[in-house]
Every structure is written in structure tokens, then in C-alpha cells.
Amino acid sequence: MEKVCIIGAGWSGLAACQVLHARGIDFDCYEAGSKVGGNWRYLNDNGMSSGYRSLHINTSKKLSEYRAYPMPKDYPHYPDHVQIAQYLDDYVDHFGFRESIAFRTSVTHVEPAEGGGWTVTSQDRDTGVETTRHYGSVVVANGHHWDPRDPEPAFPGADTFTGTQIHSHYYKVPDEYAGKRVLVLGFGNSASDIAVETSTVSERTFLSIRTGGYVFPKFMFGKPGDDMISPFITRVMPRETQRWVMALLLRMTIGKVTDFGLPKPGHKLFNSHPTVSESLLPRLGHGGLSVKPNISHFDGDTVHFTDGSSEVVDTVIYSTGYKVSFPFLDESVMAPTDNDVSLFHRVVDPQRSGLYFVGLFQPLGATTVLAEAQSHWIADLLQGKAALPSLSEMRKEITRYKEKLAKRYITSKRHTMQVDHYPYLAELRGVRRRGAKLAKKAGGTLAPDYRPEEVSIRIGASPEVVWDLISDVTRMGEWSPECRRCHWRGDKRGVGSKFIGINRRGWVAWITSNTVEQWERGKSFAFHTTTNGVRWGYRLERDGQGGTLVTEVWDVSGQNTGQRKRTASFANSMLGGYENHTEELREGMRMTLERVKAAAEQQGRPLSSVQDTARSGALVTEAVEVDTAA
């Protein structure tokens, strides 16, 4: 097994380190700061952490501690950042993997390596020296609370505001707001903490809330509030019953949020991430904090609100969340759109072999335990104890997950990766069990962390033009290097289509049936060859220069045992082994894409001329960038 690269040594990265260390998997962890802890290391010298001096965890010690290493018994129910930082230091030293962490080292670039694996470039932050190493897999745990998101778009007149505007990411202590008039925009945990804290020293603090929501206290009936959340309640009890029970508990313990001047929630309980605060409602009840609606516009030193009111303000603190960012990954590898990242069960990149993400979720619960569970699944995949399903099955799971989010949560960038603590733990246990069965069924024929073969090429034509070519299966013989004579049979394009052909070696004549599984003009085309279990697919992405990045995918993970044995037998008897078969396959895919490129870029020439040029080897490909990835 090749060495693994782990990026980040916060809550999630440390969980990955501990699990891989315990499972005997060799790894290097890169941490930009001089100590572990991420946001829990106050004034962290990594330059990215956002913790403030009064920060405490908002899930209880019982829920937040790693299952492999409980927090000290003398810790309070909700420890502060100093105690959490010490706990994380003790965690690292207890399991003995500190030597595997490279401190003051930033990962600057991660890219797929030719022939498989990943090339990782890191930089020593003190000397500036860059180092490039090869790894079999990469675990991304850089967090998603470090790249602040300002209001989008900016409020009218914001550029003329005479006061100070900052993001809550940069807030540390309330002292500098003494005697000032402060406006905090947002209704999350940080916004509530900052508004309450500044209100104790400011002349006046206003909390501007764009959308109403629910406030959960940290304690209910003398116990941590999340003690009320159990596996039974969140997994077995119907959601409407869950809402009724929790609403009753909230009414009994704190009353209605509208009694404290907060706007009435415009959504059902659990349809948005709640605010957890023990001090917000009392502070509102004491009159030390005023609630305002959303900002309308700025005018000099005055902030106007959507209800027509206005206030003179010295400082505006935007608690408007964060962007999900991976500056070390090219957009061709991973490009989040509005915090939306398509991962199989929130961990596995279906398109890229050996690329995993830990802690990339917004939990109704604690990060630590969930990150541990994710890391155990990754270790299963790395050690061959579990395998992944087919590409199409992974895509279906991702689609189902997004559909569930859309049905449950209000539309927001903060609700693109929500998970519930206990249901998600059960989900990960299930995917590990199913992965173990797949690995056993494969019997070692497929690699334990199998990914489809992929080849990419840039074509100087629009995605629509390229799509029209590759989706026309009547022209299969023009593209495929395997097909010397291909005859299309059937009355519908793609669906149920059949081919009779002789391959380029002149060895085999075949009839094959195909079923189209994905069909979106200008974006994707994929079909399943039902006779041998192979899936072929094409992904199309605009390259920003009027052209298209086309990726062809060959996936045999859906083959049954008989189909897999026949493929292996053919590879061994005719091609001298599976490696030769795979290499020939990649070359064939590359040739296919070059032929499509010739036809797409030379639409004005007769097709026969284009075809003759392509097959004669006279194609000019110096400017063609071709990437292959196992």
C-alpha cells in the first residue's frame, strides 16, 4: 500500500491520523500552523483559524469527544478552546503520531499523477522551500470554516459606509467595541456569541436577522441539551413526531422566540441549522441587545433596514458564513459551486481514485465522532476490506442525498452538506458493510479501491457540438479504434442499439446491446453494454475559452463474476495480461477522443476526409492536452 497524504491537523485531520495510525497505514500529515487544533488553537499562526477568546464548543463533551479517547472527567460539559486545544495535544501524544505531522508546512498543489496516485507539492512556511512527493491517496481535511464569505452581493452603499466593516472570522475580543454602536449581521452560533459579547461593552449592539430561526439552549432540565437527542429519536421516530417532541421541550424550557423580539421562524423545526446559545435569549430579555431585520442599504454612517428604520452605526460585523475552498486542487479536479460538493456519502470523489474528504459536512451533532467513522471507512477502502460500487450507483446516491436536502432544508449555501449525527453514523456503518460484501464478491479481481479508467482531451468546439457527435451511436465505427467494421442495428439511437463488428486485430466479431443511462445535451452521455457489463461514459465541461474538456470513462465495476472472468481470460490469452489490456484500452480511448476532436473542430470538412485524416495518423495533436488516470 502506498503512503497516504492527510491535509490538515484540526478536528477531522487528527481523526484521520489516529485511525490510519491504529490501522497500520503509513501517512504524512501537513499542517500549516505550528500546533494541532485548527480553529480550536486560539490565535493560531496558520493564518486561517477563526476562534475568538470566549469560544466554547456548542455540542456537549459527551457528544464531542473522540470515541477512541474520552475527554477528561473534570472537563465541564462545554469546554472552552484552551481545554479543547490541550485535549487535542494529549490525543496526539497518547496515540504517538506527532512525528508524522509536518508543522508549518502548507500544501500548495495536489494533482493526479500519471499512472495513478497523486503528486503533492508542499511548502515550508519558514524557509519557502517546496517539496514534491508522490502518494497513493490523499485525505483532504482542511476544514470549511476558514475562507470567509462576505454578503453576496454587497449591500447598496456599503462602499460609502464611514464606519468599519469586518467578517466575524476576524473577531477576537469585545474590548475594541467599547462605547461603540455595533451591528452584527447573521443568526448563527458565532453571530449570537459576538452580539451578546459586544453588547456588554458597547454603547448599543444590534442583531440584524435576515431569516428567523429556532434557538436551542445548551442545557435542558439541568442536562446538556443534546442529551435529548438519541439514536432512537433521530433514526426511528418520524420527523413530524421529532418536531412535536422538541417543540414541546423548547416551549417548556425557553418559551417562544417571538417573546424575546426575534422574528417568527419561516420554516419548520429541523428544516434549518438551529442556533445554539445559552445567553442570547436572556440578553434580549434584559434589553441589552436589539433585534433588527435585514439591511436595506448604507448611507454614510447610517444603516437602513428593510422595515424602514435606521441606526447610526460605528462597526458592522458580518457573520455570513464561509466558502468551501480547496486552493491546492485545480478546478478540473474539484470546483465547489455555492458550497456544493458532489461526494459519495460525503467522503469519496467518484471521479478521482484515491481522493477522500473528512469532516466536509455541517452536522446536527459533533464533528469528531463522524470524522472518526469516515476515517474508518477510508481505511477499509485503502486496505481492501471494502470496495466501492459502480460509478452510476455512486452518482445515484449523491443525487438522492441532494434531493433529500432540497426537500428538507430551506435554500441556503449553509445547507448543501447537512448531516444528522446518529443517522449519518448508521449510514456510514451501512456503507462499510456493503463495501465489505463488494470486496468479498470481487474476490480480488478488482483493486479494492477500484476507479474507472479515464482519459481527457480538450476540443476546440462547444459542448453541444461535441455531444451531438459522441451521442450518435450510429457513428460508433468512426470513433472507436476497436471497430473496423461496425454496423448499427435498432430503431432508436442509443436505447437498445446493437452493433455487429470486427475489432482492429481482426480477431472477434460480436453483437452487443447497449442501454443509455445518462443523457444530457452538452454535459454527459453514458451507456451500459449489457452483454459484457461495461459502462462507457462521456463528461463535457466548458473550458472558459469556447472549447470543451471531454473525459471518456470506462467502468467494469458492474460486471458480474462470469463477465469479469471472461474479460480476464481474454486479456491473458490475447494480450499477455490485464496490464497490457488496460494500457491498450487507454490508448484506444485516447484515439477515440482524437477522432471526435478532429470531427468537431473541422465541421466544415467532409466527414470522410476527417475520418481518413484521423485514421491515417495525420492528425495534428501537438496542442492537445491528454490526461490519463487509472
Image (spheres, grey):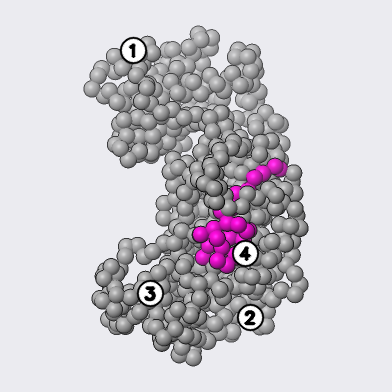
Q: Pick whichever of labels 1 and 4 is earlier in the sequence.
A: 4
Residue, x 70% and y 39% (percent of image)?
A: 383
Horizontal and vertical percent for residue 218?
Answer: 60, 77
Number of numbered discs visible in the structure rendering:
4
Q: Give percent across and percent down for residue 160.
A: 26, 71
Name which residue lies at 63% across and 58% down: 36
The image shows residue 415, relative to residue 61, as above or below, that is above
Q: Which residues are magenta?
A: 25-50
Corner quadrant of residue 230 = bottom right
Q: Which residue is mark 4?
A: 366
Q: Position of residue 413 (x, y in %)?
A: 43, 60
Q: Which residue is mark 3?
A: 316
Q: Quadrant of the N terminus?
A: top right
Q: Residues within 10 Å of mark 2 (few under 14, many from 20)?
A: some
Residue at 51 percent of width and 10 percent of height: 505
Judged by its main secondary structure, the magenta piece is loop
Pointer 4 and pointer 2: residues touching (CB < 8 Å)? no
The nearer-to-camera label among 4 and 2 is: 4
Q: CA distance from mark 2 to mark 1?
A: 77 Å
Name the residue type under label 4.
Ala
Report helix, strand or loop for mark 1.
Answer: helix
Mark 3 or 4: the one toward you:
3
Amino acid type, callout 2 = Met
Determine which residue is flagged by label 2: 220
Q: Nearer the viewer, residue 278 or 256?
A: 278
Asked whether, in this view, residue 462 is left or right of residue 483, the answer is: left
Q: Mark 3 and mark 1 in contact (Cβ < 8 Å)?
A: no
Of the image marks 2 and 1, the number of the one nearer the N terminus: 2
Q: Considering only order in the chain, which callout, 4 or 3, is on the residue closer to the N terminus?
A: 3
Look at the image and tell me in which quarter the C terminus lies: top right
In the displayed structure, 579 sits above or below 522; it is: above
